[in-house]
């Protein structure tokens, strides 16, 4: 699999996504290209799916209030991915653009709130999905026992959230320099960084107390793109979806 991505922050506020890309899927035995896919949609889905896995592992079972910070592509994909994760009694959406928040809430069973703080206070699961280059929420707003997930690729996560254990897809999120690694995890003690795989296998307990604020930082991983692309391709072949090109 080959993935080509472009990032143009100037596209924010337009109909063109800031992150765009193509994925080429190759036969795992011969190396022959077999499909070209929209990398924008697949990236959005796999990023939100990974965040949902993290929340499912780390959020308290009784979590009922979900907050989405950011009304862009990842805001939409997160609401879709998180819809059945818990029996949400309340879903709150907040964005720097009021119009984006309203548009997002209109497409999902969610309520638009006036500020990030209003969305976060009392929330059990908080999803940060912005492109901000500074912290977007303050740790003092977050209730004990909440789960905070961040998928922004700049610096949206406050340093107060990285003082304890941070859960990631791969250790390179902390050990590699940006853009491969996370801006917020540079210089963090690697001993405090735990891969989600360790929680899935039982090697790490994940949440250790009801009052712990669990933190997940996403940077993405190639295997996620490969797995997602394979699932999409298999589904397309099974349903006869897509355009077949002559050889």
Image (tube, rainbow, N blue to C red):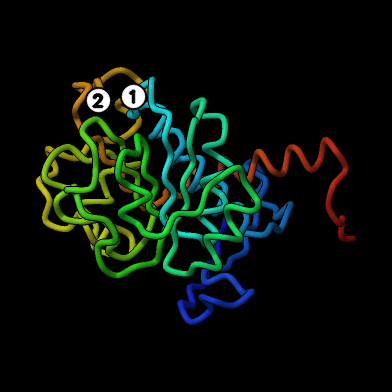
Nearer to the camera, 177 or 134:
134
Work out which quarter of the rendered image holds the C terminus and state it. bottom right
Sequence-first disc among 2 and 1: 1
Residue drawn at x 23%, y 62% as measured from the top left = 177
Nearer to the camera, 80 or 95:
95
In which quarter of the view is residue 203 placed?
Answer: top left
Q: Is residue 158 left or right of residue 217?
A: left
Counting other residues with Cα less than 10 Å from the Cα at mark 2, is it few (<14), some (14-19), or many (20 or more)? some
Counting other residues with Cα less than 10 Å from the Cα at mark 1, is it few (<14), some (14-19), or many (20 or more)? many
Residue 148, x across and y down, in percent:
31, 42
Residue 48, x across and y down, in percent:
50, 45
Gap in angstroms between the C-alphas marked 2 and 1? 8 Å
Residue 37, x across and y down, in percent:
69, 57
Q: Is residue 77 left or right of residue 147?
A: right
In which quarter of the view is residue 96 placed?
Answer: bottom left
Residue 60's mark? 1
Seen as rendered, the residue at the extreme bottom is 10
Nearer to the camera, 169 or 161:
161
- Reply above or below: 246 against 11: above
Residue drawn at x 46%, y 37% as measured from the top left = 52
Residue drawn at x 19%, y 22% as measured from the top left = 208
Return the residue at label 2. Answer: 207
Residue 141's mark? none
Of circles 2 and 1, the one toward us is: 1
Q: Describe the element under mark 1 as helix, strand or loop.
A: loop
Label pair 2/1, CB-CB below 8 angstroms:
yes
Residue drawn at x 27%, y 63% as measured from the top left = 155
């Amino acid at each position: 699999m080959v993935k080509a991505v472009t990032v143009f922050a100037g596209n924010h506020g337009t109909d063109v996504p800031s992150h765009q890309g193509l994925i080429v899927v190759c036969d795992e035995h011969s190396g022959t290209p077999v499909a070209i896919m929209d990398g924008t949609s697949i990236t959005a889905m796999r990023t939100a799916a990974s965040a949902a896995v993290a929340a499912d592992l780390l959020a308290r079972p009784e979590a009922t209030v979900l907050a989405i910070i950011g009304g862009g592509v990842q805001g939409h994909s997160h609401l879709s991915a998180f819809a059945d994760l818990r029996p949400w009694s309340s879903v709150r959406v907040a964005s720097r653009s009021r119009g984006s928040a309203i548009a997002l809430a209109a497409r999902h069973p969610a309520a638009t709130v006036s500020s990030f703080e209003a969305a976060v206070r009392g929330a059990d699961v908080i999803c940060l999905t912005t492109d901000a280059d500074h912290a977007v929420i303050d740790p003092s707003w977050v209730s004990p026992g909440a789960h905070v997930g961040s998928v922004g690729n700049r610096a949206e996560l406050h340093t107060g959230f990285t003082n304890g254990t941070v859960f990631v897809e791969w250790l390179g999120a902390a050990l590699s320099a940006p853009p491969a690694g996370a801006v917020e995890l540079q210089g963090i003690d690697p001993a405090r960084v735990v891969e989600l795989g360790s929680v899935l296998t039982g090697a790490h307990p994940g949440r250790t107390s009801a009052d712990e604020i669990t933190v997940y930082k996403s940077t993405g991983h190639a295997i996620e793109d490969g797995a997602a692309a394979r699932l999409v391709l298999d589904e397309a072949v099974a349903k006869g979806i897509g355009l077949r090109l002559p050889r």
